[in-house]
Amino acid sequence: MSDLFQDYSEAAGRSGAYDEMFAPGQQARESYGQVAVALRELSLADVSARADSMARTFLDRGVTFDFAGEERPFPLDIVPRVIPAEEWSVLERGVAQRVRALEAFLNDVYDKMTVVSDGVIPRQLVTTSAHFHRQVHGFEPAGGVRVHISGIDVVRDAEGTFRVLEDNVRVPSGVSYVLENRRAMAKGLPEAFGQQLIRPVEEYPRRLLSALRKTAPSGVDDPTVVVLTPGVFNSAYFEHTLLAGLMGVELVEGRDLICRGNRVYMRTTAGEQRVDVIYKRIDDEFLDPLQFRADSMLGCPGLVNAARAGGVTIANAVGNGVADDKLVYSYVPDLIRYYLSEEPLIANVDTFRLEEKEAREHVLDRLDELVVKPVDGSGGKGLVIGPDASKDELDALRKRIIADPRGWIAQPVLQLSTVPTLSGDKFGPRHVDLRPFAVNDGEDVWVLPGGLTRVALKEGSLIVNSSQGGGSKDTWVLADSPQMPVEVIPRPAIAVRERVSVWPVESNWRDSQKEQQQQQISDAQEVPANA
Amino acid sequence: MLSRIAESLFWIGRYVERADGTARILDVHLERLNHLPMAEQRSVAQELLAVMGARAQNDDFGLPELLNALAYDKQSATSIAGSLGAARENARRARETVSSGLWESLNTTYYGLNQHRKDVVGTYRFCNWVLERTAMVSGLADTTVSHDESWLFLVLGRSLERADMTARMLSTRDVLSAGMSWVNMLRCAGAYESFLRTRRAAFGDQHAAEFLLLDRLFPRSIVYALRDADECLAKLDPSAQRVGFINDARRIVGQARTFLEFHRTDDLMSELPEHMERVQKAVSQASDAISRKYFNQADELAWVGEVS
């Protein structure tokens, strides 16, 4: 290893986490073989030049997220994260299993609630969830799917076992960075790709579009799909434009839509055009001022009624938030057993439900050792990491928990796994998580190979959110065997079509003759001048 | 205007467009090429070179040699550096006619050719830089040169070369048969987003080829480029005839375009190589015909040469 890895093992020892690239003793694991070889060849100057170039490309291409009204590039680290085929196959099946269970749960919750009457989950827990929307109770959405797109966050604990950290089945974002990261890495660190088979990610937009079209209201032959964005100030606006662009569909804002007779239309230069499927990228609360916040300027009045009448498919369905409530999360293993009669393939992180008296007392005694999270938060908002918090913060937290035990959960501090990350002038271990994306078309749940790996760029930090100094890594899933049937079609020999009439690269004969004469003339003229 | 100047302008148009097209093709295909096993990488590199109209000297020809041959070799008219050098050389000979903006942008480009790392990573940046420079050159040509005869020759050269380069982009499909070849084809031409917007859910080789070959509104499609060339030729020689064309170039370009435009597209994929052959032949014939009609000095000078 070059000097870039000089202090790596020492730093890795300090954190005590599972390192994905190196086994103890600084031995690169097998899956990272190619990457290790490529990195070994690089000098510091080379690495920094590539990192700079990648950052500039991102800025040039506008791969940014909006933070406090400012466009910022999402830092991409130069070391990819590699997931071997056998580990991925478990993850893939585990994520799909979870999505199927949550889909069944949502269908049940907005219908008969057998899950409650069978005693799996308390009714009160469901109905007190901030995202349980009675407005969408009692109908099956057109197309029959509720969780079209999901992002299930997973992490690896100190033993290297994958565990689910949270479910995102409302508006999971980040897939645009997966697509852009792969393109940037292919140009930034081409050596590391080497001869290994890395599963491609570029088919995501096509998969998404075909799933959205498939779940259109019945009776529509050629469904029109649109992406509904809150607008240019949203933090994920770049992603909305990228997905709409790559699917070749319109990116609409609420003011572009009209509902009439339980159908949705968009205003175009050619008059009103019917919209069949809306890929909704705004929060439920803002979607429909008739049903939710009356002051919302972002949505379009009448959408929920149109969805109820089956005139439009909204993806993801309204009201999904009840399934990614963090308290419901703690029941998901039970939900998998209940709906699918399967054992969960990926375990949860141990979670204390603070409504239970014993658990609450236990947690309040050791607040300084635990992570406490609000149940409906996302983006790391409101999360308190016990060991890092000051006494005042913990006291404030204690009061809030006692005031609203339903609003919080507690988990042990997980030492997330680490991957080498460029920091200043060397590589150091940094904690990562992973968000695989799944697309559900009603028949099949397809999981994008890889997903978004977020990395905390500060040493020792466990917070990977982009709004709090996180970056990302390209995530490579290795194919176990040449899974693509490598077609050996005998290719027709390619005829060399030589270029014709090339003038005047080999400066043509007229020029060469003239050149001599011109020089003679200038020589002749110069002689008298000098004389 | 002087034939000699007209010829220079015609070739400025062609060379700049050639550099642009080559940079696009290289940029996209390098990504794929990099992931291939060594042996396959070699054969693909050689085939790609063949598509671009040159022949590998020996069997050792691999990725580094391909980079040199298509990007950095100043002696070869196939490479980006060679094309841009030649464009600048032509502009130097017509310096009093072209605008100073156009000349300076070509000259700056020429001196910038050496300021890049010549490995794979550097080549990506190089290609991007070339695209920026060529866009700037075309932009300056369009906005700082009066749209008279001289500009028409420049645009004529550009349109013909564009048709030729798009044909080569389509031919690269044969080179990498595995994977998403149509996406690459479209990316080469910068047509990916435009294509997606027009075709909605209809993907695939057939549609992509149709788009690059026949679309009437996408400026890099072959039909569009040939129509541009046709319009330039018509403006250069406005003498209207009741019947037929005296101008060979117009006949050749017009025939090629209408053949494509009115062709049935049911079996496009299997006919594609033949179409490409036709287009490239038409471009070189048209270029010859234009030389004969407008620049034509070579024949007459031959005996002047003997006398002197």
Image (tube, coloured by chain):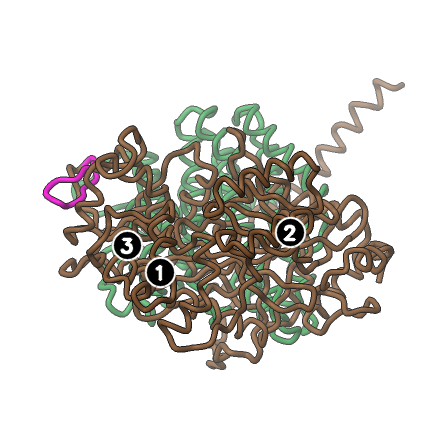
Circles 1 and 2 on the same chain = no
Q: Is residue A318 left or right of residue B132?
A: left
User: Is any atom of residue A386 visible in this view?
Assistant: yes
Pick the front one: A450 or A408: A408
Q: Is residue B48 magenta?
A: no
Q: CA distance from mark 3 to mark 2?
A: 77 Å
What colour is chain A?
A: brown
Judged by depth in the image, the label closer to the viewer, 1 or 2, is 2
Q: Which residues are magenta?
A: A258-269
Chain at numbered mark 2: A
Judged by depth in the image, the label closer to the viewer, 1 or 3, is 1
- Which residue is under mark 2? A370
Q: Is residue A371 above or below residue B52?
A: above
Q: Picture quarter containing residue B269?
A: bottom left
Residue B100 image offset from top left, x and y in percent: 57, 23
Asked whether disc 3 touches disc 2, contact meaning CB atoms under 8 Å apart, the reply is no
Q: CA distance from mark 1 to mark 2?
A: 59 Å
- Which residue is under mark 1? B209
Disc 1 residue type?
Answer: Ala
Disc 2 residue type?
Answer: Leu
- Which residue is under mark 3? B255
